[in-house]
Image: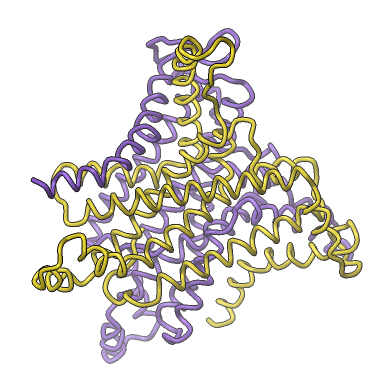
Amino acid sequence: MRLYALAVFAFLYLPIAIIALFSFNAGRHASQFSGFSTQWYGKALSNPFVMEALWNSLIVAFASALIASVFGTMAALALQGMRGRVRAIADALIYIAVMVPGIVIGIATLIALVTVFGWINPLLALLGPEGGAPQLGMGHGTLIAAHALFSMALVILILRARLEGMDRTLIEASADLYASPAATFRQVTLPMIFPGILAGFLLSFTFSFDDFIIAFFVAGSETTLPIYVFSSIRRGVTPEINAIGTMVLAASLVLLVAAQLILRRGTRSGGRDAA
Amino acid sequence: MQRRLVSGLLLAPAGVWFAVMLVLPLCFVLVFSLGERGAAGGYVPAFTLEQYANLPARGQAFLNTLILAPMGTLLALVIAYPLAYFLALEVGPKWRTTLLILVIVPFWTSILIRSYAWIFILGGQGLPALLEWMGFGAPRLINTRFAVLTGIVYGYLPLMVLPIYVSLERLDKRLLEASADLGAPPFRSFLQVVLPLSLPGVATGCMLVFILLMGEFLIPAMLGGGKVFFIGNALVDLFLQSRNWAFGAAVAVTLVAIMLVTVTFYLVLMRRLGGTRGNVELI
């Protein structure tokens, strides 16, 4: 049994390890390791296309995770203890956002936004200065909005589990001691759910940073790091991709382990984090 | 009254976001799927079921998906179950959390990079070259169904392990002792006690993996090399290359319909199994 588990863990981690190992390969070829070198990292980091894609990915991931954390937290607080129609609709929408495949979300967002922009842009052109009117198009903004949707659903799910597992008596005690609702929120609720918000932010960031399929449809002419990697793989396997891949994996591993540790520490005994 | 106002204000931004970025786009897909293709691609408004009648034109993609997705799900189940059993019943609490995190983490790392790892391993310079060197000949591994299935199992294994783990972990260990006290050999206890009680977890895992596989694009695109293509690959082609939006929308609606049928089937099955819908820890 132990050996079997070991084999499965090897299956899960060996491919990642091989990519990391060969990113330090001095030679070009995948099949033979011809000496240790960090030259491919240097090549990747001095490639302006890689840097631009990385920068785009970071902006989109940060902005979408921030929006999702703030609005998602607000929504989770409002939904806490709520019953009835609003709650049912909210639940349905959250599950749809999580369950509908990214490719369908990407396509749907693309055709909806392109069509709506097609209606709005002529109006903007009429209202704005001659020839210089701002025009809406696919790019950073649309990608941030699309990623924020999925992440918001994620944040709400994480926080809902936290809020359900929370000890209600603390809030009642706070009210009994004449704390205003705002003070109770600041001094009791927020400290208890803050790890959940932070973990939600980190997971949202990771999701956005790694997402390929939604970005593929919604990013317009912008290139994110996964889009760059996907198109360069089509041109052939190079050690440079190994180096980029290793950096991306390392970055997400750090964020994920941080999110796991934050979520699993402290008030975990109460409820199960659900998703 | 004031409470309702506060709730409304708190919900408003997320509500607007979901309306504009989820409900509106999905309505657009539905409307577009009833339209016609423009002369230069794109979409022309119409009200016709022509696009749906035309679905068999992409029958191969549906067929591939409906064969390989269940196969991948089954393979993942066979590999995941013993691991979940090990984690839930044989590992001490000290190691359990660490091992669980080790299972979850790959799921959240870039599936693009992880599939790329298999291009690297199964490609001509990788495993085949190694096998040739060892004197086994050089089989072609990349761009085959085998490669796609490997990628699928690799990508979705964590999603299968977790629900099964949850159902096994909740199992009352005294039942196992009772079964042993009554003289049942371990294998019989497993078949008659553990397995039936873990079925809700198995069903949840299969449902999750299957519906995510239905919309898969990256794994077949990268490891199937255009030879093994899924519905997702047809969608990318229809929207980004052939620009046949109306037909693409019909394919997308059909895909979501298949997923809805799967989820409904799952919910009915769960009611039969009598299991509580176990919350799965993916986070």
| Occupied quadrant, residue A251 | bottom right
Is the residue A18 above or below the residue B177 in the image?
above
User: Percent from the top left, x then y, of residue A81?
Assistant: 17, 56
Describe residue A189's horizontal placement relative to residue A233 as left or right. left
Shade of chain A as shown in the rendered figure: yellow
A90 sits to left or right of A238: left
Q: Position of residue B236 (x, y in %)?
A: 58, 31
Count all numbered tags in the image, as a single digit. Answer: 0
In the visual, does A179 lie left or right of A225? left
State the image quarter where residue B217 is shown: top right
Q: Residue at x 47, y 51 (%)?
A: A65
Image quadrant in which the C terminus of chain A is located: bottom left
Name the residue nearer the viewer: B96 or B3: B3
Which residue is located at x 40 percent, y 17 percent?
B34
Indicate left or right for B220 with B250 as reference: right
Q: Quadrant of residue B198?
A: bottom left
Q: What residue occupies the far front of the structure in this picture?
A: A129
- Drawing shade for chain B: purple
**Which colour scheme appears in the figure?**
by chain
Residue visible at 33% across and 34% down in the picture: B19
Nearest the eye: A217 or B262: A217
**Farthest top residue in view:** B39
Q: Position of residue B270 (x, y in %)?
A: 27, 56
Q: Is residue B206 above or below residue A190?
A: above
Relative image position of residue B199 (x, y in whole percent): 34, 64
